[in-house]
C-alpha cells in the first residue's frame, strides 16, 4: 500500500531558500564525486604499475618459484575491490542528486521537462560506456591467467588450492563489476513535499 506524501508547512524563508540549499549541497557533492573519481583513477594506475612490476620481476628471476605469480594476481583482484568501492560511492552520490536535488532545482527554476538534468541524462543507455571497466577487468584476467599458467598442471594440493581460491575471487570480482552489479538504492516510503514558492510576475498579479 502506497502511503500518501506528507505535507509540511515550512517557514517562508526556508521555502524561499530551498533552491539555494539544493544548489549548494549539489556543489559540495559534486566536489566529493570528483575527488572519489580521482582516487579511483589513482588506484587503477597503482594497480597497473604494481602488478606489472611484480609479474615482470617474478618472471625474470630464474631462482624464484613460478607459483609466486599468484601474488600479483591476488593483488589485482584486491585493487579491484577498492575500485568497486569508489565506483559505488560515485553511484550513491549520483543517485542522491538525481532523486532529491535535481527535482528541487527543476521545480524552483522551472526547467522544461524536455531538458534532462545531468544525472537523468547519465541514465540514458546512449550516455553509458563500460570500456574502462572492460579494460580494468581485462588486466586482472591477464594477471590471473599468468598465475594459472604458473600453477599448472595443478599436481600439488597447494597449486590446486591456490587455483580454486583465485578462480572464486575472480568470479566474485566480475560479479561485483559494473557489467553485472549496478547500484540500486531503496526508494523512500514517504516523501516530504514542501510547496514551491515563486514570486508572481506583474502580469499574473490580480492587484495590478
Image (tube, rainbow, N blue to C red):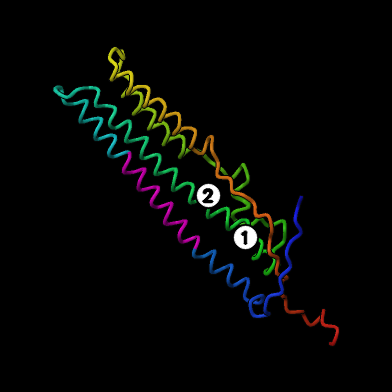
Q: Is residue 46 magenta?
A: yes
Element at label 1: helix
Q: Is residue 100 left or right of residue 142?
A: right
Q: Is residue 138 left or right of residue 54?
A: right
As drawn, the label of residue 47 is none
As drawn, the label of residue 100 is 1
- The spot of residue 157 in percent (x, y) is 29, 17
Q: Is residue 11 left or right of residue 153?
A: right
Element at label 2: helix
Image quarter where the C terminus lies is: bottom right
Q: Quadrant of residue 189?
A: bottom right
The residue under the point 79% across, 82% down is 202
The residue under the point 61% across, 62% down is 101
Which residue is nearer to you in this view: 160 or 84?
A: 160
Task: Mark 2: give few (<14), some (14-19) or many (20+) Cα within 10 Å.
Answer: some
Q: CA distance from mark 2 to mark 1?
A: 14 Å
Q: Which residues are magenta?
A: 29-47
As drawn, the label of residue 91 is 2
Q: Is residue 132 left or right of residue 79?
A: right
- Residue farthest to the bottom? 208
The residue under the point 15% across, 22% down is 62
Going from the N terminus, do you reach mark 2 or mark 1 first? Answer: 2
- The spot of residue 142 in percent (x, y) is 36, 27
Amino acid at each position: 500500500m502506497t502511503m500518501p506524501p506528507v505535507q509540511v508547512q515550512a517557514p517562508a524563508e526556508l521555502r524561499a531558500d530551498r533552491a539555494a540549499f539544493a544548489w549548494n549541497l549539489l556543489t559540495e557533492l559534486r566536489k566529493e564525486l570528483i575527488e572519489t573519481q580521482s582516487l579511483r583513477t589513482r588506484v587503477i594506475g597503482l594497480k597497473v604499475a604494481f602488478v606489472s612490476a611484480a609479474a615482470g620481476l617474478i618472471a625474470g628471476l630464474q631462482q624464484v618459484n613460478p607459483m609466486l605469480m599468484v601474488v600479483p594476481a591476488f593483488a589485482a583482484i584486491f585493487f579491484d575491490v577498492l575500485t568497486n568501492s569508489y565506483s559505488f560511492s560515485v553511484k550513491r552520490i549520483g543517485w542522491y542528486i538525481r532523486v532529491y536535488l535535481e527535482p528541487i532545482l527543476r521545480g524552483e527554476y522551472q526547467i522544461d521537462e524536455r531538458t534532462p538534468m545531468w544525472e537523468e541524462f547519465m541514465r540514458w543507455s546512449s550516455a553509458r560506456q563500460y570500456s574502462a571497466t572492460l579494460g580494468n577487468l581485462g588486466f586482472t584476467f591477464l594477471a590471473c591467467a599468468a598465475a594459472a599458467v604458473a600453477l599448472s598442471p595443478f599436481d600439488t594440493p597447494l597449486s590446486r588450492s591456490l587455483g580454486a581460491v583465485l578462480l572464486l575471487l575472480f568470479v566474485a570480482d566480475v560479479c561485483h563489476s559494473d557489467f553485472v552489479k549496478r547500484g540500486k538504492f531503496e526508494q523512500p516510503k514517504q516523501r516530504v513535499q514542501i510547496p514551491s514558492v515563486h514570486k508572481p510576475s506583474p502580469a499574473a498579479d490580480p492587484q495590478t
